[in-house]
């Protein structure tokens, strides 16, 4: 590679590193409003202008849902009650959305200050978290197709029944014999399973069932008797939190003034109009949702850029460790590669997101946690690719550099490494493509990437094919653009051949 190409290569690497730092800084500033640190639990005052983070699973209308047609704000009965309480306490409120089965873990790790998500009070949960007084008592229902309705729980024997993972409805079906129970993360997924004939019925709470039946005329619901009047929905807090007393006081004030009942009346029986499909495949059902989905492109691209650059830089360092004559460095890089390639990426992501606050007392933002997890994982694979590329460079290049007295560091940066990158460029592009597609995993920690937004639209419209096909088309276009840019870069780098 000639001197001009070497200078270009250095400038390209420097520019990419600056972009990576800027992107990580943006993630660290929590520009997406996801999972920033909470400091209230350890404080002495109740609030006094501090920000409280509320954890919720925004797929449980009318309690909490994502308003995809109006900017993607999380709205609902629980949200309105939380806003009223925090306003009365003089607090600011920020809402963090995540899967229901991750809410308790978020409380225990300090990621959120409290949880409102239609969460029932149970003896098992009391062992892990503290609860406020009950703010609403609900009843279970059986949701099924109209032409195959069920009048009681006894009629479910021998049937396929769905419940939400981590919910009290799991307990309701635990004692039924001969029932095949299917547990899913979201209520909307259960409704889709009923409509697809994968399950015969689902056990869900009454207000949620009303919303689902109103949006799907082919479904019906049956109210079940309330077996325990003492159980209902309450606000969950970390063990030892100083918030429950203050929240209970404001809940009682809302009850006495009638404000809570006004909020209940506002949301119960309120159903967003779902556009009826004219055909089996009808993209008109996406009207109003497309801008919401498209906003996920920026998150996906930012995440991919940060992950790819971190993986490339750290992978390069690891590859040099593997080629080093210093045995501790070789042992470290080999062990690192073995661990990160031998454990699931999803496990690494969850560990970094939830364990960091517990171990280091730093509330790492969700996007930064995702970038670190994917970047560190990608580095393990790229280290082997880069090592192979370095070893593939003609040995005569090294011998000539050594004969001319060129220092080892200068030789690697200016002569060997640029040629190695040129040889492994197709493999690097493949890794970037994989990162773009694997970015969908970040939705489990609440990052609103492209696929998560498509899933929100699926939940709101009760149509799976159209929003997911649109997301797939966007992913495909992104990959095409990426591979085209890679070809241009490859042709530019090979001009000196």
Image: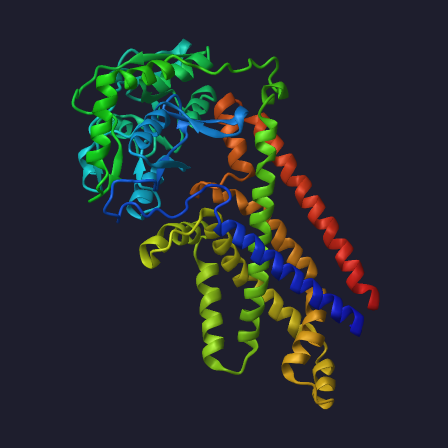
- Residue 410: image location, x then y, percent: 67, 80
Quarter of the image with the N terminus in it: bottom right
Residue name at image x 40 percent, y 16 percent: 211
Applied colour scheme: rainbow
- Residue 227: image location, x then y, percent: 18, 19
- Residue 461: image location, x then y, percent: 52, 21
User: Do we see residue 131 in this rendering?
Assistant: no
Quarter of the image with the C terminus in it: bottom right
Q: In this picture, is 436 found above or below 466?
A: below
Judging depth in this view, the residue of 334 and 348 nearest the camera is 348
Q: In this picture, is 112 found above or below 138?
A: below
Judging depth in this view, the residue of 20 and 336 nearest the camera is 20
Residue name at image x 21 percent, y 30 percent: 248
Relative to 282, 452 lies left or right: left
Which quadrant would residue 495 be assigned to in this image?
Answer: bottom right
Q: In this picture, is 1 found above or below 372?
A: below
Which quadrant would residue 221 be assigned to in this image?
Answer: top left
Which quadrant would residue 135 be assigned to in this image?
Answer: top left
């Amino acid at each position: 590679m000639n001197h001009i190409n070497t200078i270009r290569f250095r400038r390209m690497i420097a520019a990419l590193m600056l972009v990576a730092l800027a992107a990580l800084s943006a993630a660290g500033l929590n520009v997406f409003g996801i999972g920033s640190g909470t400091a209230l639990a350890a404080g002495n005052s109740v609030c006094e202008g501090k920000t409280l983070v509320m954890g919720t699973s925004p797929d449980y209308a009318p309690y909490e849902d994502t308003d995809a047609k109006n900017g993607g704000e999380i709205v609902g009965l629980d949200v309105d009650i939380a806003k009223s309480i925090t306003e009365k306490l003089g607090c600011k409120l920020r809402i963090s959305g995540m899967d229901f089965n991750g809410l308790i873990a978020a409380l225990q790790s300090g990621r959120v200050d409290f949880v409102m998500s239609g969460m029932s009070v149970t003896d098992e949960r009391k062992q892990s978290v503290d609860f406020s007084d009950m703010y609403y008592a609900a009843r279970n229902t059986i949701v099924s197709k109209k032409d195959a309705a069920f009048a009681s729980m006894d009629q479910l024997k021998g049937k396929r029944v769905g419940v939400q993972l981590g919910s009290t409805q799991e307990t309701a079906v635990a004692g039924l014999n001969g029932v095949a129970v299917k547990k899913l993360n979201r209520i909307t997924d259960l409704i889709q399973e009923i409509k697809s004939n994968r399950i015969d019925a689902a056990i869900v709470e009454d207000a949620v069932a009303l919303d689902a039946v109103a949006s799907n005329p082919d479904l019906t619901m049956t109210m079940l008797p309330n077996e325990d009047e003492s159980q209902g929905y309450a606000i969950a807090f970390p063990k030892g939190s100083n918030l429950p007393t203050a929240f209970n006081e404001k809940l009682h004030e809302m009850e006495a003034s009638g404000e809570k009942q006004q909020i209940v009346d506002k949301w119960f029986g309120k159903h967003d109009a779902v556009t009826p499909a004219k055909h089996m495949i009808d993209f008109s059902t996406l009207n109003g949702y497309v801008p919401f989905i498209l906003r996920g492109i920026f998150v996906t691209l930012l995440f991919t850029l940060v992950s790819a650059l971190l993986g490339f830089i750290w992978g390069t360092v690891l590859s040099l460790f593997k080629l080093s004559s210093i045995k501790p460095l070789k042992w470290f890089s080999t062990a690192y590669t073995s661990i990160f390639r031998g454990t699931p990426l999803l496990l690494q992501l969850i560990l970094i997101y939830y364990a960091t606050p517990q171990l280091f007392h730093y509330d790492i933002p969700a996007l930064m946690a995702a970038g670190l997890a994917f970047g560190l994982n990608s580095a393990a694979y790229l280290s082997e690719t880069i090592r192979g590329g370095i070893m593939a460079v003609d040995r005569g290049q090294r011998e000539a550099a050594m004969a001319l007295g060129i220092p080892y560091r200068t030789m690697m940066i200016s002569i060997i490494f640029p040629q190695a990158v040129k040889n492994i460029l197709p493999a690097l592009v493949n890794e970037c493509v994989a990162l773009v597609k694997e970015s969908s995993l970040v939705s489990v920690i609440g990052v609103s990437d492209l696929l998560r937004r498509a899933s929100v639209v699926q939940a709101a419209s009760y149509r799976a094919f159209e929003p997911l096909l649109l997301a797939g088309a966007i992913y495909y276009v992104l990959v095409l653009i990426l591979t085209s840019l890679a070809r241009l870069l490859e042709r530019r780098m090979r001009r000196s051949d």
